[in-house]
Image (cartoon, rainbow, N blue to C red):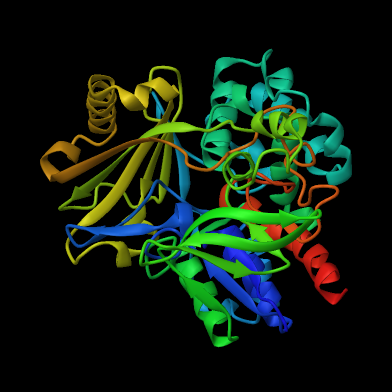
Amino acid sequence: MNLPVIVIGAGVGGLTTAALLTQNGHQVKILEKSSKVGGRTISTKFQNHILDNGFHIMPFYKKSAIFEILKKLKIDSKLKLAKVDDIAFYSSDGFHTYPKGILDLLKLSLLPLKSRIKLLRILLPIAFTSISKTESWDNTPLTKITSGLDSETNAFFEAVCMLAFADSAEHISLGEFARTIIRANPFKGGTSEFAYPDNGGYDSICNVLSDYILDQGGEIHTRQLVKKIIVEDSKVTGVLIQNLKGSDELIYTNCAVISYPAYTALNQLFEKNIIPSEFVNKINKLNKTTSVVEVHFALKSKIDSRQVVFPVGKIYTTKGIFFISNITPSVSPPGEHLIIAGTPVLPEDTDNPQKIKNIVTKMKQEISSIYPEFQQSLLWERPMAWKLVESVVKEPGKVWKSKMPHTIKGIEGLYFVGDSTISYGIGTDSAAHSSLLCTPKIESFLKL
């Protein structure tokens, strides 16, 4: 009897892996604890606007790992994308165009000419190095090359890190930063453009993938709580779930794929002594999350035609203003406009209502200082403060091949995919890259 591959989690990592497996004729059953697919990308409707759970963006546009998978599945035409390339800095002397390529740095009006040349000397060698070379920089902090720069140039690095990593430069590995610069270099086949689903809601990507999986005969079961992965004689033999009736049910399988943070799964889904404690302790060190305060604002008039604006300088709490309706009007009802502003915060700040209120007030004051018409155009606001529910591993010593491996030595039929496993990039792009790396290993096992 052919047993199904059980994929636990219907976020980008789980869905891309399942889709690649079903493409090659494998029987796949996805178990998702939520009521719908999407994982961290799930969007909601509020006041007739489509709100993402935080700001998401597809990096490197059609060069991203997600788009590579959609092309591989021949469903890239199912996802219409809007380009995100009208990006600007805002400083005390006004707006400055965001550079779209390495050579554009020479025209970067944010910086004096001398600083531009110095910045080019730093970034050019990085942009033309190899991905394999960047691995030697994975334990080095980005601040190693930025600490001696002037404040304006450091502000540039902060803006790039906010766009690429949703965090400040002090938390970023030089190796991960370098891979981002290389992938954005048009002379190496890259692009600095970004993309967002044109019909609104970043989970549109997951919906396209889930439709493909179902068309290929795969199964997707929501509201399925996985309680345990059964391992006997060092082999996966089944998955224990709590079904919709609240009863325990055993699903027999010889292959289980975990697509949510590995450090969470290792601590929750296995009997004691199945996974060596020293290995669990090592993986637990990857449990590094980004905490943010983000606020959706609905406006009755358009206050800017740009898509993204980065206020630069230490005086600004607001690190990014994203004009979602300017990216695609599909997210808002006619005559209204949606923006989201965000800033990284300390984890403890997300549990402090007064602190959140103060941050939101400061952000509104800053946006009003840039756009005097903001306050009178404001219809409503919806703050969010959260710690990311999946790892955003980008710190020195915790990136690329220092992450969770896709397999655990000595256990057959057990695989891990997603942003916390070996891959480069962060978030959804990292999760998709992980699937590209792991799926061939799963298929080799299944062929046996």
Answer whether residue 319 is visible to the viewer in this image: yes
Question: Where residue 92 sits: x, y (%)?
Answer: 39, 23
- The residue closer to the viewer here, 325 or 105, is 325
Is 31 above or below relative to 389? below
Residue at image point 71% right, 42% down: 181
Return the residue nearer the eye: 293 or 97: 293
Tell whether 60 sits left or right of 357.
right
Query: Of residues 364 and 165, which is closer to you in this image?
Result: 165
Depth check: give the residue in front, 13 or 356: 13
Examine the rendering and report whether any part of residue 190 can be seen.
no
* Image quadrant in which the C terminus is located: bottom right
Q: Quadrant of residue 262?
A: top right
Q: Quadrant of the N terminus?
A: bottom right
Q: Quadrant of residue 238?
A: bottom right
Vertical position of residue 325 compared to residue 319: above or below: below
- The residue under the point 52% across, 63% down is 10
Quarter of the rendering containing residue 439: bottom right
Tell me: 209 left or right of 149.
Answer: left
